[in-house]
Amino acid sequence: MERTFAIIKPDAVAAGHSGAILQRVEAAGFTIAAMRLIRLSKGEAQGFYAVHQERPFFDDLTTFMSSGPVVVLALAVPGAIGKWRALMGATDPARADPGTLRREFGSSIERNATHGSDAPETAAFELSYFFRGLELV
């Protein structure tokens, strides 16, 4: 069993897509090991995305991620990282495969509905950023 971290981003929450996305998560065989609805402060978003702080999109990204509520999730299933990334689809919804979450619920490369860890080390950091061990089922 592998765990990964996921976010339903502010654009998808504001559009009322959280329930549909969660339904797809469960239909794909994931176990939701933890889930919270939160609103990130700008500082929390900057800390979470610190790996991108030198990139030109960092300020826009952290402003967007702190613009409204998000759903943070710990997901578990064998091969969770790859399976979640496949379900999300490409970062750019216009290039994402039909049937993926970003294709269905994203509107642009910046507002693409979901986030997911890209490696075991990233998942460990991201899970611990939002969930303490005792919160994970």
Image: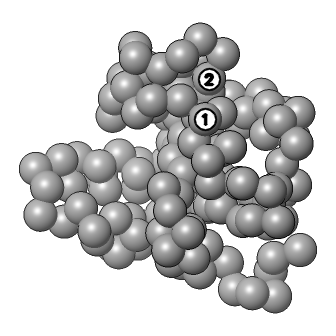
Q: Residue at x 48, y 56 (%)?
A: 118
Q: In the picture provided, is 79 more to the left or to the right than 53?
A: right
| Quadrant including the N terminus | bottom right
Label 2 sits on a secondary structure element that is loop
Q: Residue at x 83, y 48 (%)?
A: 30
Label 2: how many Cα within 10 Å (few below 14, some 14–19, many 20+) = some
| Pointer 1 with pointer 2, Cβ within 8 A | yes
Quadrant of the rendered image containing residue 111: top left
Q: Where residue 64 appears, x then y in whole percent?
A: 35, 46
Q: In the picture provided, is 63 more to the left or to the right than 27?
A: left
The residue where tag 1 is placed is: 86
Quadrant of the rendered image containing residue 80: bottom right
Above/below status of 98 relative to 106: above
The residue where tag 2 is placed is: 100
Q: Amino acid at mark 1?
A: Ala
| Quadrant including the C terminus | bottom right
Label 1: how many Cα within 10 Å (few below 14, some 14–19, many 20+) = some
